[in-house]
Amino acid sequence: MLHDLPIRYINPVYRPPSEAQSLILPVTDGCSWNRCTFCEMYTAAQKRFRARDEAEIVHSLQQLGASPLRDQVRRVFLADGDALVLPTRKLLVVLCAIREHLPAVHRVSSYCLPRNLNKKSVAELRELNEAGLRLAYVGAESGDDTVLARVDKGETFATTVAALEKLGAANISRSVMILNGLGGLEYSAAHARHSAALANATQPEYLATLVVSFPAGEQRFRAAYPEWQTPDIAALLREQEQFIAALELNRTVFRSDHASNWLSLRGNLPQDKGRLLAELRSAIAAPQNAPLRPAWARGL
Ligand SMILES: C[S@@+](CC[C@H](N)C(=O)[O-])C[C@H]1O[C@@H](n2cnc3c(N)ncnc32)[C@H](O)[C@@H]1O
Ligand code: SF4
């Protein structure tokens, strides 16, 4: 949906795979934190963080509302890296304008950092939910505080749990991302264990794993974490097995099908846990027979 729309896009624009059919509506450019050493998504000069003018966003929505897309758009993803950094009042203006000009929209979502919620109360989040915000994608990346500090995520197990609980209390669904391999070999077991503990403590509606990858090179990451030992495919799969084995989830959609993953896994937890572990174990035991993604098909 990026072409011929009355919306100003500054490339690159990222969205979760599950937002492929959504209208991408930038309400900020870049990421307000932009310090995670593994992430190059918003480091280009044109992606320097700034909030967009309310008038520009509302004008785009008015134009969409006067176009044939008015009754076709069902989902909206608020871009860029952490749209919930905006003040609640401004987010409410955007959500109300979506409701007014795109009446068929039933789901608005965005990326969100735990720190974005520090100054928002559950009551404010409920207001956002009632105005249409249904889903927040939270890049927890790890539940291990050492790993989080090594990659300068600026969050901890405790801050992430608190934010996910706040979202849950406001009825906003949570989609949590964990980065397979982020702790290298040294912290692999602790990363798997503590990441599972984070999911167990918060019971997110959606949980996804991606494999940490460096298409722009490892230089920035290694500068902060020089002893990081690159996990090979077998180590990544073993870590994934430990992570899934430790999950105790009551009702979570699990996805490990992002293009960065070597082995694509999908299931509902808890019922598919045994099958997912069996798929992983057979890939670990006989990788030559496993449906591993070829290296050329992997990406971010
Ligand atoms: C565009 S970012 C925005 C998310 C949001 N700012 C946050 O941190 O929660 C979406 C996710 O992409 C993933 N990501 C970023 N850099 C990555 C990398 N080098 N390899 C694999 N996944 C990466 C991380 O899981 C990150 O949370
Ligand atoms: S992972 Fe998220 S918070 Fe970290 S730099 Fe990337 S977009 Fe920003």
Image (cartoon, rainbow, N blue to C red):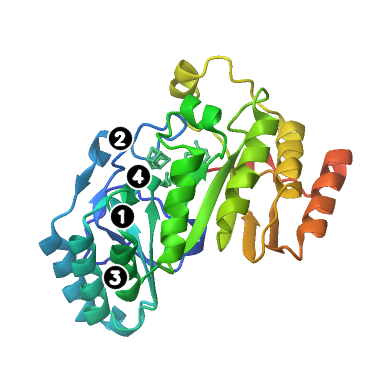
Can you name the residue that lies furthest to the left here? Answer: 55
Front label number (2 vs 4): 4
* Residue beneath disc 3: 127
Left or right relative to 51: residue 34: right
Sequence order check, earlier mark of 1 and 3: 1
* Residue beneath disc 4: 115
Say what amino acid the circle numbered 4 marks. Arg
In the displayed structure, would residue 150 be above or below residue 234?
A: above
Left or right relative to 83: residue 241: right
Q: Quadrant of residue 170?
A: bottom left
Q: Nearer the viewer, residue 227 or 295?
A: 227
Q: Quadrant of residue 203?
A: bottom right
* Residue beneath disc 2: 44
Sequence order check, earlier mark of 2 and 1: 2
In the displayed structure, would residue 109 be above or below residue 280?
A: below
Q: Is mark 1 within 8 Å of ligand 1?
A: no
Q: Nearer the viewer, residue 198 or 72?
A: 198
Contact (CB < 8 A) between labels 2 and 4?
Answer: no
Say what amino acid the circle numbered 1 marks. Leu
